[in-house]
C-alpha cells in the first residue's frame, strides 16, 4: 500500500528539483552577457553605450514576461509555461554562437530575456507554493542553484576561452538549458490555483496592498545592483586595473560563488533570524563592499570588494520574496509577477545607465550606482518593517 505522505514528499522533491534546474539555467542567463561582453567587444565592434542597450533590451524582455507570467501560472499552471521558457533560453544561446553583427547579438539578448524572465518568475513562484511552511529557506536554497548557474559560464570562459574559443562554451550552455525542459515535461505539476477562473476582485486587493509595492521597490534597487555588478564588473576590472579578460572572468565567477555561498549560509541563518533583519545586515555589507570596489587603491582590495558584495547580495532577493509569499499565498504568481516587473525595471535601468555614464565619463563613475542603490534598500526596508508591524497588514 502506498503511503500518501511519502508520495507527496516525492512529488515535492521532483518539483523542487525541476525548479532548481530552471533556476540554474536562469543563473547562466544572468551571467552570460556580462561574461562574454569583453570577447564581444573584440570580435564585434560596438561601443559601451550600445553594450548598455543590450542589457536594457534583455531586461525589458524580462519585464514584459514578468507582466505575463503571474496571471498565466495562477490560471493555467506552471508546466507548459516553464517548458517553453527553457526552449527560448536554449535557442538564444545558440543564436549567440552564430552572431556576427551587433543586431544578431541584440536579437539573441531579447529572446534570452523572455525565456530567462519566465524561468525566474515561474521557478520562484513554484518554490513558494510547494514550501508554504518554510518559504525563506526554500527560496534561498533555490537561489544557491542560481549561483551555481551564474558561476558556470564565467568559470568556463576563464578556464577554456583561450583553448577552445567562445562558441563551444555557448553550445555547452545550450545543452545545459535543455535539462530543465526535460524535467518540466516529465514531472507531474500541481493543478492551477484558479482553474475555474481568475478572481479579479481578490487579485485587485493584492495589487493595492502597500507591502507588495514596497517589496517591489526594494527589489528595484537590488535587481539594479545584481544586474549592474554582474554585467559590468568584468569590464571595470579590465579597464580600471588592467586585468585580462580571463582574470576578470575568474573574479566574476568569484562574485557568483560568493552569492551562492551566502545563500547557503542564509538557509541556516533565516531559521533563527527574522527575514527583515537578515535583509538589513545584507544591505549594510553590500554598501560597504560597493564603496570598497570604487575607492580601493589596488586591484586586490577591489577584488575583495567584489567577493564581499556577492555575499551581501545573496540573501536580499530570495528573503524579500519570502516576505511577499507569506503575505499573498493564494496569489504568488500574480504577486511575484508585479514584484518582478518593478525589480526588473531597476535591473534594466542600472546597467543601461552605467553604460551611458561609462561612455561619457569613465567606468569608475558608473560603479557609484550600487552605492546609491544599497543606501535606498536600507531606507525602503525601514518602511517594510513599519508595514509589517501595522494593523493594515494581512494575508491574502
Image (cartoon, rainbow, N blue to C red):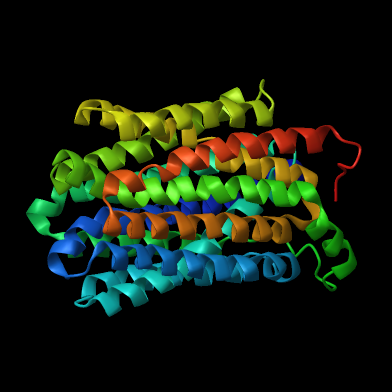
Instruction: Count all numbered tags in the image, as a single digit.
Output: 0
Q: Is residue 251 above or below residue 84?
A: above
Residue 107 x %, y %: 36, 77
Q: Position of residue 360 (x, y in %)?
A: 29, 58
Residue 184 vs residue 93, the one in the foreground = 93
Q: Quadrant of residue 242?
A: top left
Quarter of image, res 345: bottom right
Residue for point 68% across, 70% down:
72
Q: Pick out the residue farthest to the front.
A: 361
Residue 32 visible to an observer of this rendering:
no
Q: Quadrant of residue 288?
A: top left
- At 55% from the left edge and 64% from the top edge, which residue is drawn? 118
Q: Position of residue 316 (x, y in %)?
A: 56, 38
Q: Is residue 391 visible?
A: yes
Q: Nearer the viewer, residue 28 or 378?
A: 378
Q: In the image, residue 148 lies at what x, y percent? A: 39, 43
Pick out the residue farthest to the top.
272
Q: Left of 334 or right of it: where is 40?
A: left
- The residue located at (32%, 67%) in the rendering is 93
In the drawing, does residue 381 fall left or right of residue 299? right
Amino acid at each position: 500500500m502506498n503511503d500518501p505522505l511519502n508520495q507527496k514528499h516525492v512529488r515535492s522533491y521532483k518539483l523542487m528539483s525541476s525548479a532548481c534546474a530552471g533556476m540554474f539555467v536562469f543563473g547562466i542567463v544572468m551571467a552570460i552577457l556580462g561574461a562574454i561582453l569583453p570577447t564581444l567587444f573584440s570580435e564585434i565592434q560596438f561601443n559601451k553605450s550600445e553594450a548598455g542597450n543590450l542589457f536594457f533590451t534583455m531586461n525589458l524582455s524580462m519585464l514584459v514576461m514578468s507582466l505575463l507570467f503571474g496571471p498565466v501560472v495562477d490560471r493555467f499552471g506552471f508546466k507548459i509555461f516553464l517548458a517553453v521558457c527553457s526552449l527560448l533560453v536554449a535557442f538564444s544561446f545558440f543564436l549567440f554562437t552564430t552572431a556576427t553583427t551587433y543586431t544578431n547579438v541584440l536579437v539573441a539578448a531579447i529572446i534570452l530575456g523572455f525565456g530567462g524572465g519566465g524561468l525566474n518568475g515561474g521557478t520562484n513562484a513554484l518554490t513558494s507554493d510547494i514550501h508554504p511552511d518554510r518559504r525563506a529557506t526554500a527560496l534561498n536554497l533555490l537561489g544557491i542553484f542560481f549561483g551555481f548557474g551564474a558561476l558556470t559560464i564565467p568559470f568556463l570562459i576563464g578556464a577554456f576561452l583561450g583553448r577552445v574559443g567562445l562558441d563551444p562554451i555557448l553550445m555547452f550552455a545550450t545543452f545545459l538549458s535543455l535539462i530543465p525542459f526535460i524535467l518540466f515535461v516529465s514531472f507531474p505539476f500541481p493543478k492551477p490555483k484558479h482553474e475555474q477562473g481568475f478572481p479579479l476582485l481578490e487579485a485587485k486587493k493584492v495589487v493595492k496592498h502597500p507591502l507588495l509595492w514596497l517589496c517591489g521597490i526594494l527589489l528595484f534597487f537590488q535587481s539594479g545592483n545584481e544586474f549592474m555588478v554582474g554585467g559590468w564588473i568584468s569590464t571595470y576590472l579590465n579597464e580600471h586595473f588592467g586585468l585580462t579578460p580571463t582574470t576578470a572572468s575568474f573574479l566574476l565567477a568569484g562574485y557568483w560563488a560568493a552569492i551562492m555561498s551566502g545563500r547557503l549560509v542564509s538557509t541556516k541563518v533565516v531559521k533563527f533570524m527574522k527575514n527583515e533583519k537578515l535583509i538589513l545586515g545584507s544591505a549594510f555589507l553590500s554598501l560597504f563592499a560597493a564603496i570598497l570596489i570604487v575607492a580601493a587603491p589596488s586591484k586586490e582590495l577591489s577584488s575583495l570588494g567584489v567577493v564581499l558584495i556577492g555575499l551581501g547580495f545573496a540573501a536580499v532577493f530570495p528573503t524579500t520574496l519570502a516576505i511577499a509569499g507569506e503575505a499573498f499565498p493564494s496569489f504568488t504568481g500574480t504577486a511575484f509577477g508585479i514584484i518582478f516587473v518593478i525589480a526588473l525595471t531597476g535591473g534594466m535601468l542600472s546597467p543601461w545607465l552605467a553604460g551611458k555614464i561609462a561612455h561619457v565619463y569613465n567606468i569608475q563613475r558608473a560603479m557609484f550606482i550600487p552605492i546609491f542603490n544599497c543606501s535606498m534598500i536600507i531606507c525602503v526596508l525601514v518602511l517594510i518593517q513599519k508595514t509589517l508591524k501595522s494593523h493594515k497588514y494581512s494575508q491574502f
